[in-house]
């Protein structure tokens, strides 16, 4: 059974990676599909996001990373997927996700949406939260893979040099290049 895990992944977090790893145990094959969304202004380009996910998931042999635009359900049909995989964190996720699942069911009765509940430790975690913390110089290396943390800080150092160096609001110093990366579990470099 093939499942598509669609999303923005701007950038991928440890919460996404938890869903990906658990999805790979449930399905024969999983495709992480990065959405090119014209309504959002992303921090990272689609190729950057694909590369970040690939680097974090090298240990998963039944995973593919791809991108798409247009309707998720059209992409799922094109890839002959049986399921759409989505993660649920809080009640507010549920309302939107249920609406999307019902809408997708009207577009294709064959493709089921499967929800995985977030693992407790990631229930608060979102890509936007990570970007907000990094913007003000806070530590994010416990929320994203180390190489993604480096990418984010480099991005903010280029685009928001003043705010990236702000320490007034930051409880910890900027971990730009001064600190060696903390150890992470296997596969989450
Ligand atoms: P989208 O723009 O489609 O919401 P995201 O990249 O924000 O894309 O999220 C993709 C999917 O991953 C969504 O189903 C979202 O609920 C889920 N997700 C995001 N963060 C977490 C997390 N910390 N735990 C579980 N699921 C998550």
Image: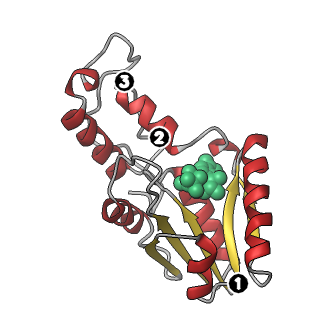
Q: Provide residue 98's location: percent of width, then percent of height.
A: 79, 57
In this picture, residue 83 sits left or right of residue 65: right
Q: Under tag 1, what secondary structure? A: loop
Which of the pair 106/117 is nearer the observer? Answer: 106
User: Circle 1 is placed at which residue position?
Assistant: 82
User: Circle 2 is placed at which residue position?
Assistant: 142
Q: CA distance from mark 2 to mark 1?
A: 33 Å
> Is residue 183 among the parts visible in the rendering?
yes
Q: Provide residue 133's location: percent of width, then percent of height.
A: 43, 29
In this view, 16 is above or below 149: below
Q: Earlier along the polypeptide chain: callout 3 or callout 1?
A: 1
Q: Earlier along the polypeptide chain: callout 2 or callout 1?
A: 1
Camera-nearest label, 3 or 1: 1
The label on residue 136 is 3
Q: Is mark 3 within 8 Å of ligand 1?
A: no
Camera-nearest label, 2 or 1: 1
Residue under the point 37% across and 43% down: 182
Asked whether the beta carbons under mark 3 and mark 2 sit within 8 Å of each other, the answer is no
Question: Which residue lies most toward the top here?
Answer: 168
Q: Count neighbours of disc 1 (C-alpha within 10 A) and say few if under 14, some if 14 to 19, many if 20 or more.
A: some
Q: Under tag 3, what secondary structure? A: loop
Asked whether the beta carbons under mark 2 and mark 1 sit within 8 Å of each other, the answer is no
Q: Is mark 1 within 8 Å of ligand 1?
A: no
């Amino acid at each position: 059974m093939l499942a598509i895990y669609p999303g923005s992944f701007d950038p991928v977090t440890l919460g996404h990676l938890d869903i990906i790893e658990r999805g790979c145990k449930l399905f024969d094959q999983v495709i992480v599909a990065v959405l090119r969304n014209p309504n959002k202004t992303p921090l990272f380009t689609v190729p950057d996001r694909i590369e970040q996910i690939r680097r974090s998931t090298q240990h998963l042999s039944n995973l593919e990373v791809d991108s798409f635009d247009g309707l998720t359900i059209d992409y799922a049909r094109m890839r002959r997927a049986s399921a759409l995989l989505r993660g649920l964190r809080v009640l507010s996720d549920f309302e939107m996700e249920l609406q999307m699942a019902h809408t997708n069911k009207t577009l294709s009765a064959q493709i089921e949406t499967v929800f995985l509940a977030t693992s407790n430790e990631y229930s608060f975690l979102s890509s936007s939260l990570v970007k907000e913390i990094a913007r003000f110089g806070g530590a994010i290396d416990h929320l994203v893979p180390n190489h993604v943390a480096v990418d984010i800080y480099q991005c903010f150092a280029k685009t928001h040099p003043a705010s990236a160096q702000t320490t007034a609001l930051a409880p910890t110093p900027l971990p730009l290049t001064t600190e060696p990366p903390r150890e992470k579990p296997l596969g989450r470099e």
